[in-house]
Amino acid sequence: MDSFELREGEVPEPRSGELLVRVHYLSVDPYMRGRMRDTESYAEPWNIGDPMEGAVVGEVTESNSNAYDEGDLVTGMGTWADYSVLDADSVTPVDPSVADLPAYLGVLGMPGRTAYFGLLEVGEPKPGDTVVVSGAAGAVGSVVGQIANLNGCHTVGFAGSDEKVEWLTEDLGFDAAINYKAVDDYGAALDEAAPQGVDVYFDNVGGPITDAVFTKLNLDARVAVCGQIAHYNDEGVPTGPRKLPQLIPVRAKVQGLLVHDYISRFETADEQLGKWVASGEIKHRESVVEGLENAPNAFLGLFSGENIGKQVVAVSGPVDR
């Protein structure tokens, strides 16, 4: 918490082509940790003193664009603030009849798109495949498992509490789930939950879970590396089992995943995810922390697994429609 401070300032004014949006909910995401390091990565690091940035959803209070009117609900990349100026060309309209506003930061936002493209394009699931998901009760993993089910796969999730395991198996339809905090031998737990081995591994976590899954990969397995949250706060480079030799006999494919590589196809993903959510084929859950001043706590809670589903912060509350 000592790394954050809350500042007050004037409400910004939108320029031509911009929207002033009253933020109702903002997103906190693990990738933000990487932007706090002065190291080369796929996203530019923040400078000390910069406002935090991320996805927001809210109501247009002033429009300098013909594309949106005052009162429209939109989502886009903004700042952790009561009001945020967004480029009208970069926002997406929000339909509250499909889902509540926080869902547009989760299943109907970047995490949902990540799950969609990461599983279907990188994981290439086939009916009958066994799909294992680490961080399965998070914003991305929970959607990955459900899409795998829709594709006729046997789905196994790793999560960090009995409550999360119950949510995955009882509500989301995972065939099995493992509370990694309650087992000593991940390999043995996988043998029980995935006796046919692993065809697709969607990795959100890294660490010992990934080490164990790699020993269970089947011939021509596919691994989608989405995140490595187990290592984001490491002071140095961790060492562990050398995994590459294990890929040779099974000819497994391991591919890193950045959702923005698929930006030209976001509309396709949004349309399909919206249909699945509206029909109830994909369920979702948001953990909501109240108050802008509590956004740092919500962010830090990601690294101890406090959230179930998507973690969001309510800034000014829901919108009546």
Image (cartoon, helix red, strand yellow):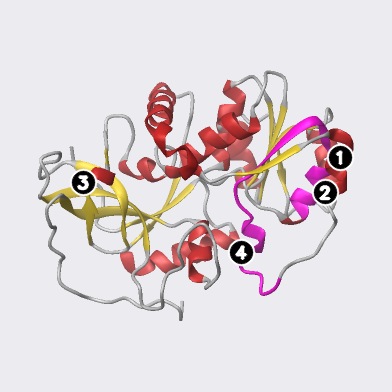
Q: Where on the picture, by quarter, is residue 146? A: top right
- State the residue position of label 3: 88
- Please identify, in this view, whether the residue under mark 1 or under mark 4 is nearer the observer: 1
- Which residue type carries mark 3? Ala
Of the numbered discs 3 and 4, the one sitting upstream in the chain is 3
Image height of 122 relative to 47, above or below: above
Image height of 316 relative to 119, above or below: below
Is residue 105 shown left or right of residue 120?
left
Task: Tell me how far mark 3 sits from mark 2, CA to CA.
Answer: 45 Å
Of the numbered discs 1 and 4, the one sitting upstream in the chain is 4
- Which residue type carries mark 4? Tyr
Magenta segment: 208-236
Structural crowding at the residue carrying mark 3, measured as other residues with C-alpha within 10 Å and reported as few (<14), some (14–19) or many (≥20): many
Locate residue 232, reporting x and y percent: 61, 64
Of the numbered discs 4 and 2, the one sitting upstream in the chain is 4
Task: Tell me how far mark 4 sits from mark 2, CA to CA.
Answer: 22 Å
Locate residue 134, reporting x and y percent: 66, 45
Secondary structure under the numbered disc 1 in the rendered image: helix
- Which residue type carries mark 1? Ile
